[in-house]
Image (cartoon, coloured by chain):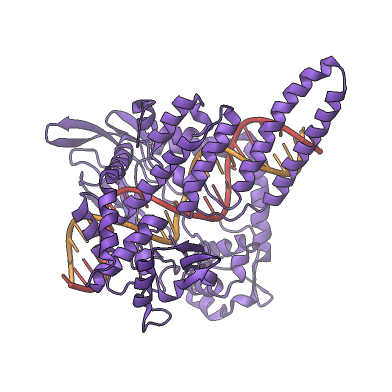
Chain colours: A purple, B red, C orange
DNA sequence: AAAAACACTTAGTACTCGGTAA
DNA sequence: TTACCGAGTACTAAGTGTTTTT
Protein backbone atom coordinates (compact mmCIF):
# COMPACT_ATOMS: atom_id res chain seq x y z
CA UNK A 1 0.00 0.00 0.00
CA UNK A 2 1.02 3.58 -0.37
CA UNK A 3 1.31 5.71 2.70
CA UNK A 4 1.47 9.41 2.22
CA UNK A 5 4.08 10.49 4.64
CA UNK A 6 2.00 12.56 6.92
CA UNK A 7 3.07 12.73 10.49
CA UNK A 8 0.90 10.45 12.52
CA UNK A 9 0.69 11.71 16.01
CA UNK A 10 -0.77 9.59 18.68
CA UNK A 11 -3.88 11.09 20.09
CA UNK A 12 -4.06 12.20 23.62
CA UNK A 13 -6.05 9.75 25.61
CA UNK A 14 -8.59 11.08 27.97
CA UNK A 15 -10.18 7.76 28.38
CA UNK A 16 -10.29 5.52 31.33
CA UNK A 17 -11.29 2.48 29.50
CA UNK A 18 -14.48 1.17 30.85
CA UNK A 19 -13.58 -2.37 31.63
CA UNK A 20 -16.76 -4.06 30.66
CA UNK A 21 -18.31 -6.65 32.82
CA UNK A 22 -17.77 -9.53 30.49
CA UNK A 23 -20.69 -11.58 29.44
CA UNK A 24 -20.22 -15.29 29.66
CA UNK A 25 -21.82 -17.38 27.00
CA UNK A 26 -22.63 -20.95 26.54
CA UNK A 27 -23.56 -22.23 23.18
CA UNK A 28 -26.13 -24.81 22.34
CA UNK A 29 -26.08 -26.13 18.84
CA UNK A 30 -29.30 -26.59 16.98
CA UNK A 31 -29.70 -28.09 13.56
CA UNK A 32 -30.26 -24.78 11.88
CA UNK A 33 -27.43 -22.95 13.56
CA UNK A 34 -26.40 -21.67 16.89
CA UNK A 35 -28.33 -20.65 19.91
CA UNK A 36 -26.67 -18.50 22.47
CA UNK A 37 -27.21 -18.97 26.10
CA UNK A 38 -26.07 -16.96 29.03
CA UNK A 39 -23.86 -18.90 31.37
CA UNK A 40 -22.38 -16.74 34.01
CA UNK A 41 -21.74 -13.17 34.78
CA UNK A 42 -19.51 -11.61 37.38
CA UNK A 43 -20.15 -8.14 38.67
CA UNK A 44 -19.24 -4.88 36.96
CA UNK A 45 -15.93 -3.15 37.26
CA UNK A 46 -15.93 0.41 38.49
CA UNK A 47 -13.36 2.71 36.98
CA UNK A 48 -11.06 4.19 39.62
CA UNK A 49 -12.32 7.35 41.23
CA UNK A 50 -10.67 10.60 40.32
CA UNK A 51 -8.02 11.77 42.78
CA UNK A 52 -7.56 15.54 43.04
CA UNK A 53 -4.02 16.91 43.01
CA UNK A 54 -2.29 17.09 46.37
CA UNK A 55 -2.19 20.60 47.86
CA UNK A 56 1.47 21.23 47.16
CA UNK A 57 1.07 20.57 43.44
CA UNK A 58 -0.24 23.58 41.58
CA UNK A 59 -1.14 24.65 38.13
CA UNK A 60 0.00 28.16 37.19
CA UNK A 61 -1.54 30.53 34.72
CA UNK A 62 0.43 33.61 33.81
CA UNK A 63 2.69 32.97 36.78
CA UNK A 64 -0.17 32.75 39.30
CA UNK A 65 -1.39 29.54 40.91
CA UNK A 66 -4.92 28.57 39.85
CA UNK A 67 -7.10 25.97 41.49
CA UNK A 68 -8.87 24.20 38.66
CA UNK A 69 -12.29 22.64 38.81
CA UNK A 70 -12.44 18.88 38.73
CA UNK A 71 -13.01 18.24 35.02
CA UNK A 72 -10.42 20.80 33.94
CA UNK A 73 -7.95 19.44 36.45
CA UNK A 74 -8.40 15.91 35.22
CA UNK A 75 -7.73 16.93 31.67
CA UNK A 76 -4.77 19.15 32.48
CA UNK A 77 -2.95 16.11 33.81
CA UNK A 78 -3.03 14.44 30.42
CA UNK A 79 -1.19 17.31 28.84
CA UNK A 80 1.22 17.51 31.74
CA UNK A 81 2.04 13.84 31.39
CA UNK A 82 3.06 14.32 27.81
CA UNK A 83 5.26 17.34 28.27
CA UNK A 84 8.40 15.39 27.46
CA UNK A 85 6.93 14.43 24.16
CA UNK A 86 7.48 16.32 20.95
CA UNK A 87 3.75 16.21 20.23
CA UNK A 88 3.05 18.88 22.81
CA UNK A 89 5.09 21.34 20.75
CA UNK A 90 3.07 20.80 17.60
CA UNK A 91 0.75 23.61 16.61
CA UNK A 92 -2.14 21.34 15.60
CA UNK A 93 -1.82 19.22 18.68
CA UNK A 94 -1.77 22.23 20.98
CA UNK A 95 -4.73 23.88 19.28
CA UNK A 96 -6.87 20.76 19.30
CA UNK A 97 -6.04 20.06 22.89
CA UNK A 98 -6.67 23.58 24.06
CA UNK A 99 -10.03 23.75 22.31
CA UNK A 100 -11.19 20.48 23.87
CA UNK A 101 -9.77 21.35 27.25
CA UNK A 102 -11.65 24.62 27.34
CA UNK A 103 -14.87 22.73 26.73
CA UNK A 104 -14.31 20.96 30.04
CA UNK A 105 -13.69 24.17 31.99
CA UNK A 106 -16.13 26.19 34.04
CA UNK A 107 -17.18 29.57 32.68
CA UNK A 108 -14.82 31.35 35.06
CA UNK A 109 -11.89 29.23 34.01
CA UNK A 110 -12.69 29.74 30.39
CA UNK A 111 -12.60 33.48 30.87
CA UNK A 112 -9.30 33.34 32.67
CA UNK A 113 -7.37 30.75 30.69
CA UNK A 114 -7.13 32.10 27.16
CA UNK A 115 -3.66 31.10 26.07
CA UNK A 116 -2.01 27.72 26.34
CA UNK A 117 1.42 29.34 26.22
CA UNK A 118 0.76 31.01 29.55
CA UNK A 119 -0.02 27.71 31.23
CA UNK A 120 2.63 26.15 33.40
CA UNK A 121 2.20 22.44 33.99
CA UNK A 122 5.66 22.05 35.50
CA UNK A 123 4.60 20.83 38.92
CA UNK A 124 1.99 18.48 37.52
CA UNK A 125 4.60 17.06 35.22
CA UNK A 126 6.96 16.48 38.12
CA UNK A 127 4.20 14.83 40.09
CA UNK A 128 3.49 12.47 37.23
CA UNK A 129 7.14 11.56 36.87
CA UNK A 130 7.34 10.79 40.54
CA UNK A 131 4.31 8.56 40.28
CA UNK A 132 5.78 6.62 37.39
CA UNK A 133 8.98 6.18 39.32
CA UNK A 134 7.09 4.95 42.36
CA UNK A 135 5.14 2.45 40.32
CA UNK A 136 8.36 1.13 38.85
CA UNK A 137 9.66 0.29 42.29
CA UNK A 138 6.38 -1.14 43.33
CA UNK A 139 6.21 -3.49 40.39
CA UNK A 140 8.63 -5.86 42.02
CA UNK A 141 6.04 -6.59 44.61
CA UNK A 142 3.76 -7.15 41.67
CA UNK A 143 0.83 -5.62 43.45
CA UNK A 144 -0.38 -3.88 40.34
CA UNK A 145 0.30 -6.82 38.10
CA UNK A 146 -1.67 -9.06 40.36
CA UNK A 147 -4.55 -6.61 40.44
CA UNK A 148 -4.51 -6.44 36.65
CA UNK A 149 -4.43 -10.19 36.30
CA UNK A 150 -7.37 -10.43 38.63
CA UNK A 151 -9.37 -8.09 36.45
CA UNK A 152 -8.47 -10.03 33.33
CA UNK A 153 -9.28 -13.26 35.11
CA UNK A 154 -12.65 -11.96 36.17
CA UNK A 155 -13.77 -10.02 33.15
CA UNK A 156 -11.46 -11.12 30.35
CA UNK A 157 -13.04 -14.39 29.35
CA UNK A 158 -16.16 -15.78 27.84
CA UNK A 159 -17.24 -19.30 27.05
CA UNK A 160 -18.09 -20.15 23.46
CA UNK A 161 -18.63 -23.66 22.21
CA UNK A 162 -17.69 -24.85 25.67
CA UNK A 163 -14.25 -23.31 25.33
CA UNK A 164 -13.10 -20.59 27.64
CA UNK A 165 -11.78 -17.78 25.42
CA UNK A 166 -9.97 -14.52 25.97
CA UNK A 167 -11.83 -11.51 24.49
CA UNK A 168 -10.38 -10.14 22.66
CA UNK A 169 0.24 15.44 10.91
CA UNK A 170 -2.88 13.92 11.87
CA UNK A 171 -5.57 16.58 11.69
CA UNK A 172 -7.09 15.45 14.97
CA UNK A 173 -4.00 15.05 17.07
CA UNK A 174 -4.39 16.39 20.57
CA UNK A 175 -8.16 16.01 20.73
CA UNK A 176 -9.69 14.56 23.81
CA UNK A 177 -11.18 11.14 23.97
CA UNK A 178 -14.12 11.18 26.28
CA UNK A 179 -14.55 8.74 29.06
CA UNK A 180 -16.97 6.00 28.11
CA UNK A 181 -19.99 5.67 30.33
CA UNK A 182 -22.36 2.74 30.62
CA UNK A 183 -24.91 5.01 28.95
CA UNK A 184 -22.76 4.83 25.77
CA UNK A 185 -22.47 1.06 25.71
CA UNK A 186 -24.60 -1.45 23.86
CA UNK A 187 -24.60 -4.95 25.28
CA UNK A 188 -25.15 -7.86 22.94
CA UNK A 189 -26.27 -11.08 24.56
CA UNK A 190 -28.89 -13.71 24.09
CA UNK A 191 -32.50 -13.15 25.08
CA UNK A 192 -32.73 -15.75 27.77
CA UNK A 193 -29.50 -14.73 29.42
CA UNK A 194 -29.12 -12.87 32.64
CA UNK A 195 -28.35 -9.39 31.40
CA UNK A 196 -25.19 -7.94 32.96
CA UNK A 197 -25.88 -5.29 35.57
CA UNK A 198 -24.62 -1.79 34.77
CA UNK A 199 -22.64 -0.05 37.53
CA UNK A 200 -24.88 1.32 40.26
CA UNK A 201 -26.82 4.40 39.24
CA UNK A 202 -26.16 3.79 35.56
CA UNK A 203 -27.88 2.08 32.70
CA UNK A 204 -26.76 0.64 29.38
CA UNK A 205 -27.49 2.49 26.17
CA UNK A 206 -29.15 -0.63 24.87
CA UNK A 207 -29.27 -4.36 25.38
CA UNK A 208 -29.76 -6.28 22.18
CA UNK A 209 -29.79 -9.89 21.13
CA UNK A 210 -28.11 -10.25 17.76
CA UNK A 211 -26.40 -13.57 17.12
CA UNK A 212 -25.45 -12.65 13.55
CA UNK A 213 -22.52 -10.53 14.77
CA UNK A 214 -19.56 -11.49 16.92
CA UNK A 215 -19.22 -8.54 19.27
CA UNK A 216 -20.22 -8.64 22.91
CA UNK A 217 -20.37 -4.91 23.51
CA UNK A 218 -19.98 -1.75 21.41
CA UNK A 219 -19.93 2.03 21.71
CA UNK A 220 -19.22 5.06 19.55
CA UNK A 221 -15.92 6.81 19.99
CA UNK A 222 -16.11 10.61 20.05
CA UNK A 223 -13.06 11.70 18.03
CA UNK A 224 -13.83 10.02 14.70
CA UNK A 225 -17.37 8.92 15.50
CA UNK A 226 -16.50 5.32 14.69
CA UNK A 227 -17.75 2.19 16.39
CA UNK A 228 -15.62 0.29 18.84
CA UNK A 229 -16.23 -3.29 19.84
CA UNK A 230 -15.39 -5.87 22.43
CA UNK A 231 -14.64 -9.03 20.47
CA UNK A 232 -13.07 -12.42 20.97
CA UNK A 233 -9.38 -13.09 21.11
CA UNK A 234 -7.53 -14.26 17.98
CA UNK A 235 -7.08 -17.75 19.40
CA UNK A 236 -10.82 -18.33 19.69
CA UNK A 237 -12.58 -20.86 17.53
CA UNK A 238 -14.74 -18.20 15.94
CA UNK A 239 -11.76 -16.18 14.73
CA UNK A 240 -9.83 -19.31 13.83
CA UNK A 241 -12.55 -20.46 11.50
CA UNK A 242 -12.70 -17.07 9.85
CA UNK A 243 -8.95 -17.15 9.39
CA UNK A 244 -9.07 -20.61 7.87
CA UNK A 245 -11.78 -19.46 5.45
CA UNK A 246 -9.63 -16.52 4.41
CA UNK A 247 -6.75 -18.78 3.41
CA UNK A 248 -9.07 -21.20 1.65
CA UNK A 249 -10.39 -18.36 -0.52
CA UNK A 250 -6.81 -17.38 -1.30
CA UNK A 251 -6.01 -20.97 -2.21
CA UNK A 252 -8.95 -21.10 -4.56
CA UNK A 253 -7.54 -18.09 -6.39
CA UNK A 254 -4.64 -20.31 -7.43
CA UNK A 255 -6.92 -22.26 -9.74
CA UNK A 256 -8.13 -19.23 -11.64
CA UNK A 257 -5.38 -16.69 -11.28
CA UNK A 258 -3.96 -17.46 -14.71
CA UNK A 259 -7.28 -16.82 -16.39
CA UNK A 260 -7.75 -13.61 -14.43
CA UNK A 261 -4.30 -12.41 -15.40
CA UNK A 262 -4.90 -13.19 -19.05
CA UNK A 263 -8.17 -11.32 -18.85
CA UNK A 264 -6.77 -8.13 -17.43
CA UNK A 265 -3.91 -8.18 -19.93
CA UNK A 266 -6.54 -8.25 -22.62
CA UNK A 267 -8.61 -5.57 -20.90
CA UNK A 268 -5.65 -3.22 -21.15
CA UNK A 269 -6.73 -2.66 -24.75
CA UNK A 270 -10.43 -2.37 -24.11
CA UNK A 271 -12.34 0.40 -25.78
CA UNK A 272 -13.98 1.24 -22.47
CA UNK A 273 -11.93 3.64 -20.40
CA UNK A 274 -13.36 2.22 -17.19
CA UNK A 275 -12.34 -1.30 -18.14
CA UNK A 276 -8.83 -0.18 -18.95
CA UNK A 277 -8.50 1.60 -15.64
CA UNK A 278 -9.76 -1.50 -13.88
CA UNK A 279 -7.19 -3.61 -15.72
CA UNK A 280 -4.30 -1.34 -14.73
CA UNK A 281 -5.47 -1.18 -11.14
CA UNK A 282 -5.69 -4.95 -11.02
CA UNK A 283 -2.22 -5.19 -12.51
CA UNK A 284 -0.89 -3.03 -9.65
CA UNK A 285 -2.80 -4.96 -7.02
CA UNK A 286 -1.57 -8.28 -8.34
CA UNK A 287 2.00 -7.35 -9.14
CA UNK A 288 2.77 -4.90 -6.36
CA UNK A 289 0.39 -6.17 -3.69
CA UNK A 290 -1.12 -2.71 -3.27
CA UNK A 291 -4.13 -2.41 -1.02
CA UNK A 292 -7.50 -1.60 -2.55
CA UNK A 293 -7.63 2.07 -1.54
CA UNK A 294 -11.11 2.94 -0.36
CA UNK A 295 -12.20 6.55 -0.39
CA UNK A 296 -12.29 8.36 2.89
CA UNK A 297 -13.25 11.73 4.17
CA UNK A 298 -10.75 14.41 3.43
CA UNK A 299 -9.26 16.17 6.43
CA UNK A 300 -10.66 13.57 8.80
CA UNK A 301 -7.76 11.16 8.67
CA UNK A 302 -4.15 11.10 7.57
CA UNK A 303 -3.68 11.28 3.82
CA UNK A 304 -2.83 7.70 3.02
CA UNK A 305 -3.69 6.14 -0.30
CA UNK A 306 -4.11 2.71 -1.83
CA UNK A 307 -4.51 1.63 -5.41
CA UNK A 308 -7.90 3.11 -6.33
CA UNK A 309 -7.20 6.34 -4.48
CA UNK A 310 -3.86 6.96 -6.19
CA UNK A 311 -3.48 10.51 -7.41
CA UNK A 312 -1.55 11.93 -10.31
CA UNK A 313 1.27 13.22 -8.11
CA UNK A 314 1.97 9.79 -6.67
CA UNK A 315 3.58 8.35 -9.78
CA UNK A 316 6.08 9.40 -12.42
CA UNK A 317 6.51 7.64 -15.72
CA UNK A 318 9.85 6.99 -17.36
CA UNK A 319 10.40 5.38 -20.75
CA UNK A 320 13.82 4.31 -19.55
CA UNK A 321 15.36 4.51 -16.11
CA UNK A 322 18.61 2.95 -14.94
CA UNK A 323 18.76 0.80 -18.03
CA UNK A 324 15.25 -0.56 -17.62
CA UNK A 325 12.39 0.13 -19.95
CA UNK A 326 8.91 1.37 -19.08
CA UNK A 327 9.38 2.23 -15.46
CA UNK A 328 6.74 3.55 -13.10
CA UNK A 329 8.18 5.38 -10.17
CA UNK A 330 5.98 5.43 -7.11
CA UNK A 331 6.43 7.78 -4.24
CA UNK A 332 9.15 10.41 -4.38
CA UNK A 333 8.94 12.83 -1.50
CA UNK A 334 5.43 12.67 -0.19
CA UNK A 335 4.85 8.96 0.17
CA UNK A 336 6.16 6.39 2.56
CA UNK A 337 6.05 3.73 -0.12
CA UNK A 338 8.80 4.12 -2.68
CA UNK A 339 9.18 1.74 -5.55
CA UNK A 340 10.49 1.66 -9.09
CA UNK A 341 8.80 -0.95 -11.20
CA UNK A 342 9.34 -1.91 -14.78
CA UNK A 343 5.93 -2.55 -16.27
CA UNK A 344 4.26 -3.92 -19.31
CA UNK A 345 4.40 -1.52 -22.26
CA UNK A 346 0.64 -1.34 -22.50
CA UNK A 347 0.34 -0.46 -18.86
CA UNK A 348 2.67 2.47 -19.31
CA UNK A 349 0.76 3.63 -22.37
CA UNK A 350 -2.48 3.48 -20.44
CA UNK A 351 -1.06 5.36 -17.50
CA UNK A 352 0.05 8.13 -19.84
CA UNK A 353 -3.46 8.25 -21.17
CA UNK A 354 -5.00 8.41 -17.68
CA UNK A 355 -2.74 11.28 -16.70
CA UNK A 356 -3.54 13.43 -19.71
CA UNK A 357 -5.16 16.75 -18.89
CA UNK A 358 -4.96 16.13 -15.18
CA UNK A 359 -3.17 18.01 -12.49
CA UNK A 360 -1.89 17.40 -9.03
CA UNK A 361 -4.64 16.25 -6.69
CA UNK A 362 -6.69 14.54 -9.41
CA UNK A 363 -7.47 10.85 -9.15
CA UNK A 364 -5.40 8.62 -11.39
CA UNK A 365 -8.31 6.23 -11.81
CA UNK A 366 -11.22 8.62 -12.24
CA UNK A 367 -13.58 5.99 -13.64
CA UNK A 368 -12.95 3.41 -10.96
CA UNK A 369 -13.56 2.79 -7.29
CA UNK A 370 -13.13 -0.17 -4.99
CA UNK A 371 -16.80 -1.17 -5.17
CA UNK A 372 -16.66 -1.51 -8.94
CA UNK A 373 -13.38 -3.36 -8.76
CA UNK A 374 -14.61 -5.82 -6.16
CA UNK A 375 -17.89 -6.35 -7.98
CA UNK A 376 -15.90 -7.33 -11.05
CA UNK A 377 -13.63 -9.61 -9.05
CA UNK A 378 -16.46 -11.44 -7.35
CA UNK A 379 -17.95 -12.19 -10.77
CA UNK A 380 -14.69 -13.92 -11.71
CA UNK A 381 -14.58 -16.04 -8.57
CA UNK A 382 -16.97 -16.19 -5.63
CA UNK A 383 -15.52 -14.47 -2.60
CA UNK A 384 -12.76 -12.77 -4.56
CA UNK A 385 -11.93 -9.20 -3.53
CA UNK A 386 -8.86 -7.01 -3.92
CA UNK A 387 -7.38 -7.98 -0.59
CA UNK A 388 -7.39 -11.67 -1.47
CA UNK A 389 -4.58 -10.98 -3.91
CA UNK A 390 -2.38 -9.83 -1.07
CA UNK A 391 -3.02 -13.01 0.89
CA UNK A 392 -2.56 -15.16 -2.18
CA UNK A 393 0.65 -13.53 -3.38
CA UNK A 394 2.12 -13.41 0.10
CA UNK A 395 1.50 -17.08 0.79
CA UNK A 396 2.55 -18.33 -2.63
CA UNK A 397 5.75 -16.28 -2.41
CA UNK A 398 6.60 -17.81 0.95
CA UNK A 399 6.02 -21.29 -0.40
CA UNK A 400 8.18 -20.73 -3.47
CA UNK A 401 11.00 -19.13 -1.51
CA UNK A 402 11.02 -21.94 1.02
CA UNK A 403 11.26 -24.51 -1.72
CA UNK A 404 14.37 -22.94 -3.15
CA UNK A 405 16.46 -23.13 -0.05
CA UNK A 406 18.96 -25.93 0.40
CA UNK A 407 20.81 -26.22 3.66
CA UNK A 408 20.80 -28.59 6.54
CA UNK A 409 22.03 -26.48 9.40
CA UNK A 410 19.16 -25.42 11.66
CA UNK A 411 20.56 -21.95 12.18
CA UNK A 412 20.88 -21.36 8.48
CA UNK A 413 17.46 -22.86 7.85
CA UNK A 414 16.02 -20.23 10.11
CA UNK A 415 17.85 -17.50 8.27
CA UNK A 416 16.39 -18.87 5.06
CA UNK A 417 12.92 -18.89 6.54
CA UNK A 418 13.29 -15.33 7.71
CA UNK A 419 14.55 -14.37 4.28
CA UNK A 420 11.48 -15.89 2.68
CA UNK A 421 9.34 -14.08 5.25
CA UNK A 422 11.22 -10.89 4.45
CA UNK A 423 10.57 -11.27 0.74
CA UNK A 424 6.87 -11.22 1.57
CA UNK A 425 7.15 -8.28 3.94
CA UNK A 426 8.93 -6.32 1.24
CA UNK A 427 6.26 -7.26 -1.26
CA UNK A 428 3.56 -6.01 1.09
CA UNK A 429 5.56 -2.97 2.16
CA UNK A 430 5.48 -3.79 5.84
CA UNK A 431 7.89 -1.19 7.04
CA UNK A 432 8.89 -0.13 10.45
CA UNK A 433 10.90 2.73 11.80
CA UNK A 434 14.47 1.50 12.22
CA UNK A 435 14.82 0.78 15.93
CA UNK A 436 16.41 3.72 17.70
CA UNK A 437 19.12 1.52 19.06
CA UNK A 438 19.64 -0.35 15.83
CA UNK A 439 23.16 0.80 15.06
CA UNK A 440 24.27 0.30 18.63
CA UNK A 441 22.85 -3.18 18.81
CA UNK A 442 24.43 -4.13 15.49
CA UNK A 443 27.74 -2.83 16.76
CA UNK A 444 27.35 -4.82 19.97
CA UNK A 445 26.75 -8.00 18.05
CA UNK A 446 29.76 -7.30 15.83
CA UNK A 447 31.96 -6.76 18.87
CA UNK A 448 30.84 -10.09 20.22
CA UNK A 449 31.62 -11.81 16.95
CA UNK A 450 35.04 -10.18 16.81
CA UNK A 451 35.92 -11.16 20.33
CA UNK A 452 34.78 -14.71 19.67
CA UNK A 453 37.01 -14.78 16.62
CA UNK A 454 39.95 -13.68 18.69
CA UNK A 455 39.20 -16.33 21.26
CA UNK A 456 38.92 -18.82 18.46
CA UNK A 457 42.30 -17.91 17.00
CA UNK A 458 43.82 -18.06 20.43
CA UNK A 459 42.29 -21.40 21.16
CA UNK A 460 43.50 -22.83 17.90
CA UNK A 461 47.04 -22.15 18.86
CA UNK A 462 46.69 -23.82 22.22
CA UNK A 463 46.64 -27.40 23.38
CA UNK A 464 44.47 -30.35 22.42
CA UNK A 465 42.17 -29.53 25.31
CA UNK A 466 41.60 -26.15 23.78
CA UNK A 467 40.60 -27.67 20.50
CA UNK A 468 37.33 -28.87 21.91
CA UNK A 469 36.47 -25.39 23.07
CA UNK A 470 37.39 -24.06 19.69
CA UNK A 471 34.89 -26.37 18.12
CA UNK A 472 32.09 -25.22 20.39
CA UNK A 473 33.15 -21.67 19.91
CA UNK A 474 33.15 -22.06 16.17
CA UNK A 475 29.52 -23.19 16.17
CA UNK A 476 28.63 -20.33 18.37
CA UNK A 477 30.37 -17.98 16.03
CA UNK A 478 28.35 -19.23 13.11
CA UNK A 479 25.18 -18.71 15.08
CA UNK A 480 26.05 -15.15 15.88
CA UNK A 481 27.14 -14.12 12.43
CA UNK A 482 23.96 -15.58 11.01
CA UNK A 483 22.03 -13.63 13.61
CA UNK A 484 23.89 -10.52 12.60
CA UNK A 485 23.05 -11.03 8.93
CA UNK A 486 19.46 -11.64 9.84
CA UNK A 487 19.17 -8.59 11.98
CA UNK A 488 20.91 -6.36 9.49
CA UNK A 489 18.60 -7.38 6.69
CA UNK A 490 15.73 -6.68 9.02
CA UNK A 491 16.42 -3.05 9.80
CA UNK A 492 13.35 -1.52 8.19
CA UNK A 493 11.18 -4.54 7.63
CA UNK A 494 8.49 -5.78 9.96
CA UNK A 495 8.10 -9.53 9.64
CA UNK A 496 5.35 -9.88 12.18
CA UNK A 497 2.52 -8.36 10.16
CA UNK A 498 2.77 -10.79 7.28
CA UNK A 499 3.28 -13.73 9.60
CA UNK A 500 0.17 -12.76 11.51
CA UNK A 501 -2.10 -11.80 8.66
CA UNK A 502 -1.02 -12.98 5.24
CA UNK A 503 0.97 -16.20 5.35
CA UNK A 504 -1.05 -19.37 5.42
CA UNK A 505 0.22 -20.98 8.64
CA UNK A 506 -0.05 -24.43 7.11
CA UNK A 507 2.88 -23.60 4.82
CA UNK A 508 5.10 -22.86 7.79
CA UNK A 509 3.87 -25.81 9.82
CA UNK A 510 4.54 -28.20 6.95
CA UNK A 511 7.95 -26.67 6.37
CA UNK A 512 8.89 -27.17 10.01
CA UNK A 513 7.80 -30.79 9.83
CA UNK A 514 9.84 -31.44 6.71
CA UNK A 515 12.90 -29.57 7.87
CA UNK A 516 12.74 -30.91 11.39
CA UNK A 517 12.81 -27.40 12.75
CA UNK A 518 10.94 -26.97 16.04
CA UNK A 519 7.84 -24.87 15.46
CA UNK A 520 8.60 -22.51 18.30
CA UNK A 521 11.63 -21.21 16.40
CA UNK A 522 9.20 -19.71 13.91
CA UNK A 523 6.05 -19.05 15.93
CA UNK A 524 5.97 -17.54 19.37
CA UNK A 525 3.33 -18.44 21.90
CA UNK A 526 0.75 -15.98 20.56
CA UNK A 527 1.13 -17.21 17.02
CA UNK A 528 0.99 -20.85 18.08
CA UNK A 529 -2.25 -20.05 19.89
CA UNK A 530 -3.73 -18.19 16.99
CA UNK A 531 -2.78 -20.88 14.51
CA UNK A 532 -3.72 -23.83 16.68
CA UNK A 533 -6.19 -24.86 13.98
CA UNK A 534 -3.41 -25.14 11.41
CA UNK A 535 -0.97 -26.89 13.71
CA UNK A 536 -3.57 -29.56 14.36
CA UNK A 537 -4.62 -30.23 10.82
CA UNK A 538 -1.47 -29.84 8.70
CA UNK A 539 0.39 -32.79 7.23
CA UNK A 540 3.96 -32.52 6.01
CA UNK A 541 2.85 -32.64 2.38
CA UNK A 542 0.55 -29.64 2.57
CA UNK A 543 0.62 -27.52 -0.57
CA UNK A 544 -0.91 -24.07 -0.58
C1' DA B 1 -26.86 5.29 -7.01
C1' DA B 2 -24.46 7.58 -3.62
C1' DA B 3 -23.46 8.07 1.13
C1' DA B 4 -23.29 6.54 5.64
C1' DA B 5 -23.15 3.04 8.97
C1' DC B 6 -21.47 -1.10 10.46
C1' DA B 7 -18.54 -5.09 11.29
C1' DC B 8 -14.48 -7.04 10.98
C1' DT B 9 -9.23 -7.29 9.45
C1' DT B 10 -4.73 -5.30 9.15
C1' DA B 11 -0.77 -2.53 10.77
C1' DG B 12 2.36 -0.45 13.47
C1' DT B 13 3.68 1.71 17.98
C1' DA B 14 4.57 1.57 22.79
C1' DC B 15 5.08 -0.95 26.65
C1' DT B 16 6.27 -5.17 29.56
C1' DC B 17 8.97 -8.57 31.29
C1' DG B 18 12.48 -11.95 31.62
C1' DG B 19 17.18 -12.96 30.61
C1' DT B 20 21.85 -11.42 30.74
C1' DA B 21 25.81 -8.40 31.16
C1' DA B 22 27.92 -5.14 34.14
C1' DT C 1 21.84 -6.17 42.51
C1' DT C 2 21.02 -3.27 38.90
C1' DA C 3 20.73 -1.71 34.24
C1' DC C 4 19.88 -2.75 29.78
C1' DC C 5 18.09 -5.06 25.80
C1' DG C 6 15.05 -7.30 22.76
C1' DA C 7 11.28 -10.42 21.94
C1' DG C 8 6.71 -10.70 22.77
C1' DT C 9 2.34 -8.56 23.79
C1' DA C 10 -1.33 -5.12 24.26
C1' DC C 11 -3.56 -1.82 22.19
C1' DT C 12 -6.01 0.88 18.87
C1' DA C 13 -5.89 3.56 14.52
C1' DA C 14 -6.56 2.77 9.91
C1' DG C 15 -7.82 -0.12 6.65
C1' DT C 16 -11.46 -3.36 3.73
C1' DG C 17 -15.79 -4.67 2.24
C1' DT C 18 -20.88 -5.41 3.10
C1' DT C 19 -25.29 -3.65 4.42
C1' DT C 20 -28.49 -0.06 5.28
C1' DT C 21 -30.21 4.47 4.62
C1' DT C 22 -31.00 8.49 2.06
Q: Nearer the viewer, residue A84 or A30?
A: A30
- Residue in view at x 46 percent, y 57 percent: A15
Q: Is residue A53 left or right of residue A18?
A: right
Query: Eyeballing the image, is A391 above or below A169?
Result: above
Give the residue at the far top of this rendering: A465
Furthest residue to the bottom?
Answer: A357
Q: Is residue A534 left or right of residue A448?
A: left
Which residue is at the front of the view, A538 or A533?
A538
Q: Position of residue A76 (x, y in %)?
A: 56, 65
Q: Position of residue A413 (x, y in %)?
A: 55, 32
Q: Is residue A113 above or below residue A12?
A: below
Is residue A515 in sight in this rendering? yes
* Residue located at (45% from left, 49% from top): A47
Q: Quadrant of residue A24?
A: top left
- Residue placed most toward the observer, A423 or A61: A423
* Position above or below: A369 against A409: below
Picture quarter with the C terminus of chain A: top left
**Which residue lies at the image location 42% right of the left edge and 63% below the top edge?**
A343
Q: Nearer the viewer, residue A335 or A343?
A: A343
What residue is at 47 percent from the left and 28 percent from the top?
A: A512
Q: Is residue A148 left or right of residue A469?
A: left
Residue C2, image x, y percentages: 76, 39
Amino acid sequence: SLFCYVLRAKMLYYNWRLLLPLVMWEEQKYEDGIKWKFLEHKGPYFPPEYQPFPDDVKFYYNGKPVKLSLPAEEVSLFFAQMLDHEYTTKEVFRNNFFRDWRKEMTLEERQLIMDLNKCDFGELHAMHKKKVEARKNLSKEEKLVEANQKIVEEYGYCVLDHHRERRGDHPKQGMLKKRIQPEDVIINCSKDSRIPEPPAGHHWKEVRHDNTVTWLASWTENVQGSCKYVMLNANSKLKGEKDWEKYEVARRLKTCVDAIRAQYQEDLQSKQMGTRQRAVALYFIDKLALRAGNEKEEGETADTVGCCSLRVEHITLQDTLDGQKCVVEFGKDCIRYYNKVPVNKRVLKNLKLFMENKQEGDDLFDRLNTQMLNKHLSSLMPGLTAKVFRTYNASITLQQQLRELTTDNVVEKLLSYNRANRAVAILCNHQRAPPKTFEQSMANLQTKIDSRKEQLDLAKKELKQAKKEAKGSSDNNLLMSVQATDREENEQIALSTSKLNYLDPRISVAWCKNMEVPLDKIYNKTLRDKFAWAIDMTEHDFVF
